[in-house]
Amino acid sequence: MGPLELECAGRKVRLGGFRQQALLATLLLEAERVVPIERLLEAIWEDTPPASAKGQVRICVSAIRRQFVGAGVGDLIETHPAGYRIRLPSAALDLSRFEHLAALGRSAARDKHPEQAVDLFRSALAQWKGPVAAGLESRVLRQAATMLREEQLSVLEECVDLELQMGRHRKVVGELYRHVAENPYREQMCGQLMLALYRSGRQADALRQFRETRTLLSAELGIDPGESLRTLEQAILVEDPSLEAPSQPAPAAAPGRPAPVTSLIRQPAHRAARTTWTDHTLALRNRLNSLQQANLRLQATLKL
């Protein structure tokens, strides 16, 4: 996850050109599974493979095998009738480490061990060094990179949800600003930033973030923010007590992902927020009626 790199015993192994790297990256993304030869052709040449493409793939595989053997790791690529498969120890590939650590983090969250879950999620995210197979222009690799980026962001959101439930809002504000700027359509992440800002005593910044997201969604997609984000904005406006940071670490939601930040506005608080908002609205209406009555009296006096 990042530029394609091969390391053996602490020493980086020099890889060949684009064809070898694209082929190896495709095999690694499907580690322990047979990758059809057609998939490898697409990864290297997309829709225009030459007549000699299959022969060139065999040449690339032979070259990669020699590099593996020269690095002292042996022949890791198997030949099958339908294509090729690379065999690796589970800890040898950063993608495998990420998936394993993320799964352990989710298990810890389900078991209500938020501290352990956060540590595991952070270890999983640390495996990323940049976009998947960065620098290799290939449709197959771009598609894989997009799917894995989505998984990375999902793990990040799960991790931040737990950290917010544990009162670590100040710690995550800067990180969330960066990720929201890079992924402005992710409303869950925007809500996390709004909550972290509000808990850090920055109510105005939290509301500004909502307005920026609403403007972007309206201008770019012609839609309004979802209900959960709008509910969070209203809770911030009325300073709903349920938004305050917990005094004790909150247990993770189970099963599945931690409860999203907007669920921190509990049902009783919803009613309290609506009551507070209604009282505020009634006060404004009463004030408006008083002003209208005063205006009528003034007009009557002027006519006299």
Image (cartoon, rainbow, N blue to C red):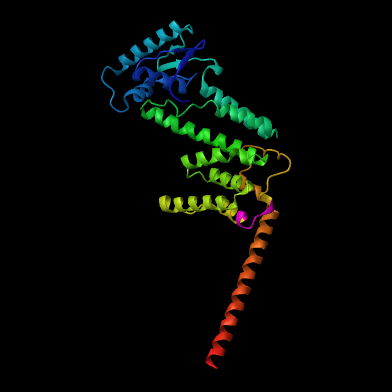
Q: Is residue 121 above or below residue 180?
A: above
**In front of the other: 200 or 64:** 200
Q: Is residue 116 above or below residue 40?
A: below
Query: Residue most toward the right?
Result: 248
Q: Is residue 198 visible?
A: yes
Magenta-drawn stretch contains 240 = yes
Q: Quadrant of residue 163?
A: top right
Q: Is residue 89 above or below residue 173?
A: above
Determine whether, in the image, residue 8 is placed left or right of residue 253. Answer: left
Magenta-drawn stretch contains 206 = no
Residue 165 image position (x, y, % from top left): 66, 41
Q: Is residue 258 visible?
A: no
Residue 294 image position (x, y, % from top left): 59, 82
Residue 193 image position (x, y, % from top left): 56, 44
Residue 176 image position (x, y, % from top left): 54, 40
Question: Which residue: 59% across, 30% down?
Answer: 122
**In front of the other: 10 or 200:** 200
Write the start and end of the magenta stretch as one range.
235-241
**In front of the other: 274 or 139:** 274
Across the whole image, how many numbered discs are drawn on residues?
Answer: 0
Question: Which residue: 47% across, 11% down?
Answer: 76
